[in-house]
Amino acid sequence: MQKECLLEVSGLKTTFLTENGPVTVVNGVSFQVSAGETLGVVGESGCGKSVTSESILRLLNEKTTRYEGEINYKNRNLLSLTEEEMRSIRGNEISMIFQDPMTSLNPVYTIGDQIAETIMIHQKVGKKAAFAKAVEMLRLTGIPSPEKRVHEYPHELSGGMRQRVMIAIALACQPKLLVADEPTTALDVTIQTQILDLIQDLKQQLDMGVILITHDLGVVAEVCTRVVVMYLGEVVEEAGVEELFENPLHPYTQGLLQSVPQLDGDRSKKLYVIKGAVPSLTNVPKGCRFAPRCNYATDLCRQSEPELMGNRHKVRCWHADTNLQKEGELYVADGS
Amino acid sequence: MDAKTVLEGTYFSDSRKELQKERRSLLIRRFLSNRMLLTGSVITVLLGIIALLAPFLTSYTPLEMQMVKRLQAPSLEHWFGTDNFGRDLFSRVVHGTRVSMAVGISVAFITMITGTVIGLYSAYYKFLDHILMRICDGLMAFPGILLAIALTAALGSNMINVIIALSIISTPTIARVVRSAAIVVKEQVYIEALRAQGASASRIIWYHMAPNTVSPLIIQITFVFAVSVLIEAALSFLGAGIAPPNPSLGNILYDGKVVIFSAWWMTVFPGLFILLSVLGLNLFGDGLRDMLDPHTNKAKK
Amino acid sequence: MWQMAVEDETPLLHVKNIKKYFPITTPFGKVKGHVKAVDNIDFALHKRETLGLVGESGCGKSTTGRTIMRLTEPTAGEAIYKGKDLFQLKGQELQALRREIQMVFQDPYSSLDPKQIIGHAIEEPLTIHKLGAKKERMERAMDLLHKVGLREDQYYRYPHEFSGGQRQRIGIARALAVDPAIVICDEPVSALDVSIQSQVINLLQELQHNYDLSYVFIAHDLSVVRHISDSIGVMYLGRMMEKAPTEELFAQPLHPYTQALLSAVPIPNPKLKKERIILKGDIPTPINPPAGCVFHTRCPYAEARCRTEIPMPRDLGMNHVVACHLYD
């Protein structure tokens, strides 16, 4: 089971330098992804999940962004590579697909051109071979009659088809790691199932690691093997998917799980509510970042921030021990 | 809630006042941090003051001729020198600036009204759009200055007619800017929400679409102002604008053209004032756009 | 007693066979076809009830809501509210109707005028319908702010100072300002974060309970619709595929499309690996919808007659209506 670690993010801190001073959007995020694994990164808007993924590929404007920490891929720290070295990694070793399949394709080129372009950038092949490969990629992503489709323009395809094309582009060079940023959020449910299935299938065929960024806990439960829950730029909990859904330790994770209406839930009961709203990153609460919205918060929580603790099931909470019997190491003497 | 018993207007008046204070100080901070806007407004305000106080700034009237003092170089007595009729150039330039500013402001004001009305209504009513925009297209097909010359030639050359002519040629630009902003606004959900409430067309147009087109409108108006100053000078230079002997920056330049090699001050000073007023207004407009329009702001960063 | 019974019998709003076709014209103005956005939809909404309309993009659920609001004119059909056909009303009567049916919109960012303080936004319906003096309107707005969980002193703030969830609360307050009987909620929570979603759903339910409201709840998220609705209509390409009371629909989905839709919803429980029905292909465009049953191109059970014959809705008892040849 224990495969070699493909990508290791440790202590990643991404800071935007705005005109009103620096804003730390991702604050000390660490996780690992192995080949053949799907890591889910969940959180609400503003939790830094998308910025984390963009930091991995260093897609953010380097002039206004400061990275700290390490992102190790094949014993190299991506954050210390030159822009040129980085370019040979993007799309070739690590690929990304985005949320909006409508705007992430260039409307003036055929989809064949766009797939072939990626192939020609990274591999020394001619246009013909690249096109043949493009057709093959389209077939792999389940697009019917790919020989015909390859000459079509993005506007001639539906949303689901475009997302397949995006996946074809992302996988054209057989990357080792796929970063999928909300790949199904803009799609209909029946199309979402198709796309998620496709990603799962291709992951196994190509033995990739996948980082799936999403806000939908249902999607996480269906496709991920491990989950990282983020809140306000920090990882608050990390665990295997079954463990997390069965035994969530962080009050935020618990709240998230309970506030979603379920298909087999009790309709007469009111939905659970996490009080308040996500605070702004320019005004981060003192102590535990979740304390102002947490039902269990004590003075300790409001005073000092807990560390991410634990081995296989990590959690950032002073009171996790009250919910946790199995992992005694988590016990924190908080005077009680 | 006992606050309810309090008279209207005093509801949470403290928090309201505080909010207004906060917003005002934010606006002032943004204004002061915008160097272009600051420079532009300083120049424009200075010229405005000069134009307003023109009669009090000089000891000579602009029409007073002293034939013995023809074409004198700038001196302590005549700051900008005198012209070929022995009139005090400083007084003429200052009064000319007054005319330019008056023309600019009037044109800006008139086109703001006509352009807004035309722009808003053609954005809201499709059938009006076809008619009004074709008229605007027609007007824009002529070079502005030619049209203005033709109009003043037909109407006679005085300040009122110059203002009318300039308003006619500037209205289409404003109308187009307002229309394109209003069309975007019209497609917003809140307009649909108003329609669902049964709000009348005029309420939607004037209470909801108009306020949301104000920023592009104001920006465009400053440019119309600047262009009007420039075209008025050009018209007067060509003899189709303000008729001599009344001073205008344009006709002073015209007078100076003949003596350009012997009396440099007759071209330099009115030229400088035209330059300053247009530069000031353009800086002001550009700065305003940066402040009001967040998109260009982001693009810059 | 008798009146009570009648009230329960006759629906508050009865939508009968509405159609909305958008003409497609050539550049010379000739009509060359129609987008059948809504095709023969009917449903009944009772007092204090919530009717959910679910479906994927292009199924016409939003157009249905907008047609009832008279934001677009229907091509055919009628909507009976208090004995009157909404689609025939004009002038004063239409104005009066607009007070009783209100709408909450999907996008909390574009549904509020950015240049208007939110207090005035909430008062706007009152101003339009000339209800109450200025002071009364203000009091009403303050009261509503309180009811939807905002603070009264936020009256003077502009929309950009609020988060998405708060803006949606303002939108709800605006809809409630004129004491409507029916609120059409067009995807009211789909733009919100998970933790905010549940706040707004709870608020909607609470308000329904307190003010005897009836909702038409339009959404694409089945679990949300299930939670809030008393009965649900499943739409596909402008047609109603299945309609049933919520419990009944989920216990016994009959239409193949409903079955597929249900199985496609990701369940936040990794241990529950259910059997999935993965539909092949894409949703066809409503410009040239398939002949016969519109679903036949993706239906695993399609037969020859599905391709030619339009299935009629059949009531199979317990108010469970389904339009599918499998149940003929």
Image (spheres, coloured by chain):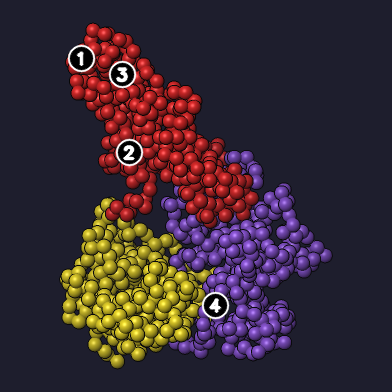
The x, y position of residue C276, in whole percent, is 51, 87
Q: Check disc 3 and report the residue beneath it.
A: B92
Answer above or below: position of C286 versus C104: below
Q: CA distance from mark 3 to mark 1?
A: 14 Å
Of the pair B34 and B92, the residue shown nearer to us: B92
Which residue is disc 4 drawn over?
A: C283
Q: Colour of chain A?
A: yellow
Please, what secondary structure does the residue beneath circle 3 have? helix
Whether B162 is drawn above or below B78: the answer is below
Q: Are marks 4 and 3 on the same chain?
A: no
Among the chains pictured, the one given red colouring is B
* Residue found 27% across the figure and 78% down from its top: A120
Chain ID at mark 2 = B
Closer to the chain start, of discs 1 and 2, is 1
Give the alpha-carbon distance from disc 1 to disc 2, as whole Å.
34 Å
Where, quadrant-wise, is the C terminus of chain B in this rendering?
A: bottom left
Q: What residue is disc 2 on?
A: B282
**Residue at x 66% of width, y 81% of height:** C292
Q: Is residue C227 visible?
A: no
Q: Do the residues under discs 4 and 1 have CB atoms within 8 angstroms?
A: no
Marked residue chain, label 4: C
Residue kind at label 3, given as amino acid type: Arg
**Chain C as rendered: colour:** purple
Q: Which mark is residue B72?
A: 1
> Which amino acid, by three-letter code, is at mark 4?
Ile
